[in-house]
Image: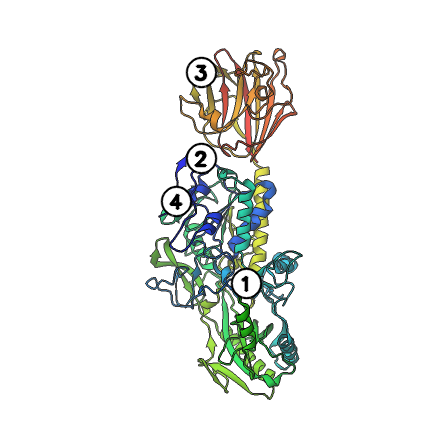
Amino acid sequence: MVAELVTTGCSLVKQNVQDTAFTHDAIGRYICNTWEEAVDNCGAPFDAIVIGAGMFGAYCAEKIYRFGENDSLRVLVLDAGAVLVTEHIQNLARLGLDAPAAIRPDPKKPRNEVWGLPWESNEAFPGLAYCIGGRSLYWGGWSPRLTTDDLDQWPQQIRDFLLNQYERTEKEIGVLPSTDFITGTLFETLKSELQSVQSEVGTVTEVVEAPLAVQGNSPGSGLFSFDKYSSTPILIDAIRDDALRINSFTTEKYRRLFLVPKAHVTKLMVDQGSIRRIEAIVDGTKKSMDIPSSCAVVLAASTIESTRLALNSLTTSPDDTLIGHNLMAHLRTDITIRIRKSRFQNLSGQLEPAALLIRGKAQLPSGTIGQFHIQFTAAQIPRNEQNPEKNMFRMIPDIDLLDQTLQNNDPDWIVMTFRGIGEMVGDRSKDKLQKRFIDLDRSASDEYGRRAWVNMMISPDEGRLWDVMDQTILDLGKKLARQSQIHYLVNGQWQSTPPTRTNIKRDPLGSTHHEAGTLWMGTDSNKSVTNLDGRFHDIFNAYVAGPALFPKIGSANPSLTSLTLARRTASAIVDAVRTAKTNQPYLTLFDGTTMDGWQMSGSGRFNLVNGTMISEGGPGILWYTPQMFDDFFLKVEWKASAETDNSGVYFRIPALNSMDWTPADREGYEVQIDDRGINSEENRMGDPLRQTGAIYKLAPSQKIASHPVTSGQWNTFEIKVKRDLFQVVLNGELVTEYRDVVQRSARGFIGLQNHHPGSSVAFRNIVIKRI
């Protein structure tokens, strides 16, 4: 059983590392937090909440955290799954964690501990990987760019952005340098042979090295290679960077990045064009949190589930919205052949892999051009094997097993797989008649609300493209074999005749994990769902990360493009939050006409006199009750009536009852007003820790910059609080700067002190803005 989390004010009792019968869950404890640890730690409101920690959510969250460092942006990541492993499963020893095959959605047939299928459909799907990292732990790694033809229906600004930024992402995920882990005579031979027959197959346009997100070489001296890419390591590294920066178990309120697992977001509540509340089921318990309108919410829970959440939350008319239309995926065929090894010259004696990308296009009945590409892999493999990729994408940790694997290959045959991937064309109208779309299923629901209904089918054009792509593969195989013997793998058996339309291996439409397009971006809010930064046109703080943003899918695997767009979205979010904070208007707490919103705690009172609030009696605190503040810029004008007057401006204090004001001293901070600097504990005067402008008892005032009481002039405090840095400017002079070490609350109320009977300090023109 998980130990209960005990909350004492804002001080959280930590959970220990949990033990099962088999494991110490140090990974989960050092990466994740409970909902209470992340949300109820008295820290500042979050600047971004990312829903989904899969390939694109984890990536986007890490970028917001990194890009927002100078602005101390806080990021919360919510994922419906738990921690499984910390990197791509192919970088690890074999654990039996392979992805399942596609099935027809059926709530009565759960998948396994990780994989789930939450939607209904007319097609078979593998479903979702409910774990931190999601599909990024499983994906194939193929990362081709979208070509100019693929991008022909994309906004020009995004086309230019992608073509300019692809290389940056390729370097980040290991695509560049290319083929740094695939080398050898087989690779070089087949690349040359395929390039030589390219012109003999009219539908082929290009043969290039495989753009695989695998880094085999070190990115720098003394560094390990990144291996096969997953977004999980970068998110974990950012979380640990944040935790180690704080380096204490008692300072969650100053943490900037949290990951809460088993948190399934069920509803986003919209008010006046912004998401203002998030509802979730966290480990079986209903939770909710209110958020400021400036907080960005990123939907990154896969194309289908993000669309489901958008339909459930962001539109009042699910039947009259663009959301869910333009659904696209890929047409996919797998054809495996083997060619006599004697056909090729100078091949080495041990196992070698090869991987290449072949692009093609076809004229379609409608007059349009359809795009496709072929992922080509080949290997010298053991005699009874049929999969050339079996040992290509995995770690073999045993040197003896490695030697055996490398040497145990078929002396007669080279096995090759052609995986064709053809584009599907979306329909961006609202018509649901005989087309592809995602809608809410009126008859099916689960514990999180109405399920999505996913409708998929192919058009006549796409049927023709699929046929052309398959024939291109067969033509390439035949041309590559020349006059040598060639066999085709059909229904698990080798045969000398090519497969036909009835027995060729075509995958279900939903099997590719490439669903895209249902929240597509564009410049016209009447013809697209999101803008060019991935933000919903009519929801000011809602964004999307992932291929749901694609106006057109093209033939390429969507990961490279989606990661590049997620980087753009993260940058846009940071800029938007920074601008919102910078341009935040001043809120008037007191304008001289009313004391509405102010409440007294303790003895004494404040009187409203000629546009001012004047303290009388004490001790006590008058505090502003409508809202709490975290980072802010506060201006306060004040004037003492005698040298013996004493008061102060409090910030980040807790809510107070009518009688007890002392929690403000224990849990908050006070900017002192007392030119004498009285230290009653030591019975002396002139204590810098207790004189005007000091952070009382914590940071000394460097000088007395207040006007003499006898002058009758008003003084102006300008108090800037930015996370743990406090600055006090008095009458234009910086008198105190303090880096907080006591680390009390990171958020709280504003208050004014009345210190003792006989002290009379006046206040006016009190304004504040968040920063």
Q: CA distance from mark 1 to mark 3?
A: 66 Å
**Residue type, numbered disc 2:** Cys
**Residue type, numbered disc 1:** Pro
| Residue labelled with disc 4 | 287
| Residue labelled with disc 3 | 604
Q: CA distance from mark 4 to mark 2?
A: 18 Å
**Residue type, numbered disc 3:** Gly
Circle 4 residues within 10 Å: few <14, some 14–19, many ≥20: some
Q: Is residue 88 above or below residue 579?
A: below
Assign a secondary structure to mark 3. Answer: loop
In the image, taking residue 707 as reference, residue 88 lies left or right, namely: left
Point out the tag, 1 or 3, that comes first from the N-terminus.
1
Q: CA distance from mark 1 to mark 2?
A: 43 Å
Residue sticking out furthest to the front: 400
| Residue labelled with disc 2 | 10
Point out the tag, 4 or 3, that comes first from the N-terminus.
4
Q: Is there CB contact under 8 Å for labels 4 and 2?
A: no
Q: Is residue 116 above or below residue 618?
A: below
| Residue labelled with disc 1 | 558
Q: Quadrant of residue 440?
A: bottom left
